[in-house]
Amino acid sequence: MERKDWPLWEVFVRSKAGLSHKHSGSLHAPDAEMAISNARDVYTRRNEGVSIWVVESKHIHSTLETDSESMFDPNEDKIYRHPTFYDIPDEVGHM
Amino acid sequence: MSETDLQTIFDRKIENEVKIEPKDWMPDAYRKNVLRQMAQHAHSEVVGMLPEGNWITRAPSMRRKVALLAKIQDEAGHGLYLYSAAETLGTDRERLVLDLLEGKAKYSSIFNYPALTWADIGAVGWLVDGAAIVNQIMLQKTSYGPYSRAMIRICKEESFHQRQGYEILLTLCRGTEEQKAMAQDALNRFWWPSLMMFGPSDKDSPHSAQSMAWKVKRMGNDDLRQKFIDQTVKQADFLGLTIPDPDLKWNEEKGQYDWGQIDWEEFYNVIKGNGPCNKERLAARQAAYDNGAWVREAATAYANKRAQRRDKDAA
């Protein structure tokens, strides 16, 4: 690995115990250990987190914008998947 | 999909305030425009560390020193957020850094002025960061997703920068006559260059109209400058300092301040490389790059060695 080949890492930060890790940003580093150390300095300078994940960007696979219609649109006509689709009389109380 | 269809999808997104993301189709000119702006912005954060770095060892108290260090560390982080955002458009970090060192990329003209006295550190925080914040608040709504997210993060961190600068000046203005004179002198020197930070008037700005149409920028240079002036005058009044503009006057009818003329000749001269510190700033960046080479090499060698050891253990 040459200096210019330092991989790009995506940084995920857990803001407090009990919450999931959330994407914060990215950075370059030669290895995971240094990526974590740099992520700490860059993304958690003000108590933003209690735990950090780093993942090499090349390992992230994603949907394509051109696929988004076939991927996500079928959900739109399935309103019976939502609680408000069902009629429950008020007398029953909160459900 | 044909290019016309892709263009239509892009146009509809811009119209409907849907952010453009790195893998989305975008016109080449849009890509170039956003990349140029983000790179300039990133370089400005990094070069912006230099005038203040000059004062770390001479900060008048431990309180001021830790604040200044934290502010400068933030600028480095902001540079990184913006370089990362720029890289999503298909350039790499090394290229961006070299563009700056080779003089191919610009950075904000303000950082070519020296910080001569401690009061200048106050003026930089109050005025330079103040002007930057006005610009950055607008850019939170920029149409390019990664740029917008970087701006939101930066704005969240940056408000302390302006407050620490103002506090420095407030302390000086409540001090001795000499201290107050030092604060006035800093305002005298930083006022006009701060107004220049918003760039040329929209009618003379080569990129303004197109940037607005693409919603890369959400307000013109002139409106942003006016907003900054309107919010800063009363802060100067509170300090008991005089803004060095004899034409500055409240206009009741317009509900904003009238003000004098920017010396655009000075602005273009600084942009061209003839400001008080252009050469010094680039030399400092080059020295940092050269002197840091062994650290980057050592980190690479260490990572390579550890990878080899892992492979051997696995075998």
Image: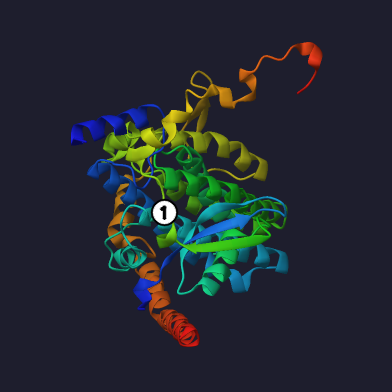
Vertically, is B253 above or below B126?
above
Q: Quadrant of the N terminus of chain B?
A: top left
Q: Image height check: is B304 above or below A78?
A: below
Residue A86 sits in which quadrant? Answer: top right
Closer to us: B11 or B164: B11
Q: Residue at x 53, y 59 (%)?
A: A11
Residue B32, position as x, y percentages in the image: 27, 48
Residue type at mark 1: give it.
Answer: His
**Residue denoted by label 1:** A61
B298 lies above or below A26: below
Determine the image quadrant of residue B219.
top left
Q: Residue at x 39, y 34 (%)?
A: B222
Seen from the viewer's position, the closer of residues B182 and B151 is B151
Q: Is residue B88 left or right of residue B66?
A: left
On screen, residue B85 versus residue B154, left or right, reads: left
Residue B253, can we see it? Answer: yes
- Position in image of residue A21 (x %, y %): 61, 53
Q: Nearer the viewer, residue B96 or B245?
A: B96
B59 or B108, which is in the foreground? B108
Chain of the residue where label 1 is placed in the rendered structure: A
Q: Position of residue B48 (x, y in %)?
A: 47, 60
